[in-house]
Image (cartoon, rainbow, N blue to C red):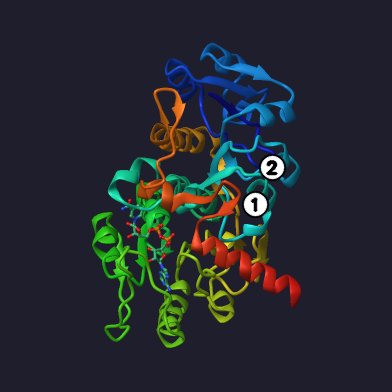
Amino acid sequence: MRLAVLKESAPGETRVALLPDAVKSLVAKSLEVAVESGAGVASGHSDEAYAQAGATIAVDRASLLASADILPLVNAPNAEDQRSIKPGAVAIGFLRPLDEPAMLLPAIESGVTLFAVELVPRITRAQAMDALSSMATVAGYKAVILAADNLPRMFPMLMTAAGTVAPAKVFVIGAGVAGLQAIATARRLGAVVEAYDVRAAAGEQVRSLGAKFLDVDLGGIATEDKGGYAKELSEEALERGRDLIAKTAKTADVIITTAQVPGRRAPLLIRRDAVENMRQGTIVVDLAAAGGGNCELTRPGETQVLNGVMLFAPLNLPATVPGNASQLYSRNISNFLALIVKEGVLTLNMEDEILSGSCVAHQGKVVNPRVTAALEAHAAAQSHP
Ligand code: NAD
């Protein structure tokens, strides 16, 4: 059984799928591990560290792809790389199967078994494999650091001989994993924090972090599905949230927005007029940019200055903290591998709900109904542009 760790090729990607310590334990379980030269350099892990962990270092990417039985990845490889993967091999990573399903067709057609970490069910047994939560934790932290670095003020309240410095006011929209980490980070820096979420259950978690939870009367409608995620709201309910957000944003120094509804475009929550009424120097970090953004003016991947308001829309904040992002991801991937490698042999028990839930394609066929629907929608859009 041969496992290969690639140097990620997506622009700006600095993370690596497995760290040397994870490689060491796989080698101890009789797996052969090959690492593409330079794979870990951007996250602080040299080829020597991988070699010491028992990996062989390879420079020929195509032969690495052609010989591996298992490919732990951060991002989906490009089409050419996908065509080089050995048929029947298993690839695991952030494959964006619902966002860009057609990008995976070369690997699907050549019979690669694909597992998307985004689709790992959020059941208790899978918590240690929850890469979405790991990356959201890093992004929530880094969003606050980015805002603090660009804010013309400090976060904590200070009483000095030269006068008192008021604490910064931070407003967090969406109190899921990223939002809660943003609240905790902003509180540690001494800010006064307010947060809003449509799920009432988030209120208790927000308050336990020392922040104020803002409630909106949504007329008692269900805002949460049975999996604990937010539901898509009616336009009327969304508008009530937007009004509260516009009012709160007028006096905030920093706004971190993280709201997402799984499988949907990110909800539009910050209207243009809300941005126009913000104070000069306000910082907005739209962490939902990859899903289209929570702010009407967001341009994914760009930073804009609009009437003195800085609007950040980063697409890959975890890649700006590659050491810890890779550490957490490597652990998530190792735990997933423990599920599919038994006594050194690839063993795919497709009855296991973690495997069946996260599998995109197996033996040349798409096996996930949501991915099938996404591919059909893509094909329809291509034929009727
Ligand atoms: P997410 O990234 O899908 O969304 C982020 C937040 O945006 C959520 O809290 C959501 O309620 C909020 N949101 C959606 N629409 C909104 C709107 N119109 N206005 C305001 N806020 C809106 O969520 P997530 O961070 O992945 O987590 C969602 C839930 O799943 C949380 O309850 C979390 O605790 C839970 N979770 C469970 C596990 C597990 O293993 N059991 C793991 C991770 C998360």
**Which numbered marker is on residue 350?**
none
Q: Position of residue 200 (x, y in %)?
A: 27, 70
Asked if residue 43 is positioned above or below residue 99 in the image, the reply reads: above
Which residue appears at 58% of the width and 59% of the height?
Answer: 290
Which residue appears at 69% of the width and 68% of the height?
Answer: 379
Q: Position of residue 94 (x, y in %)?
A: 55, 47
Tell whether 260 sits left or right of 55: left
Residue 155 seen: no
Residue beneath disc 1: 104
Tell whether 78 sits left or right of 338: right
Say what secondary structure mark 1 lies in.
helix
Proximity of marks 1 and 2: CB atoms separated by less than 8 Å: yes
Q: Is the distance from the Cβ of mark 2 to the nearest ligand 1 atom less than 8 Å? A: no
Quadrant assignment, res 342: top left
From mark 1 to mark 2, how far is it between C-alphas?
8 Å
Q: Earlier in the sequence, mark 1 or mark 2?
A: 2
Asked if residue 266 is positioned above or below residue 313 in the image, the reply reads: below
Q: Position of residue 246 (x, y in %)?
A: 47, 78
Three-letter residue code for mark 2:
Gln
Give ligand 1's quarter of the image: bottom left
Tell whether 315 sits left or right of 252: right
Which residue appears at 56% of the width and 18% of the height?
Answer: 50
Q: Position of residue 241 (x, y in %)?
A: 41, 79
Tell whether 339 sits left or right of 266: left
Residue beneath disc 2: 82
Q: Quadrant of the C terminus?
A: bottom right
Q: Nearer the viewer, residue 40 or 371?
A: 371
Three-letter residue code for mark 1:
Leu
Asked if residue 88 is positioned above or below residue 166 in the image, the reply reads: above
Dot 2, crowdedness within 10 Å: few (<14), some or many (≥20)? Answer: many
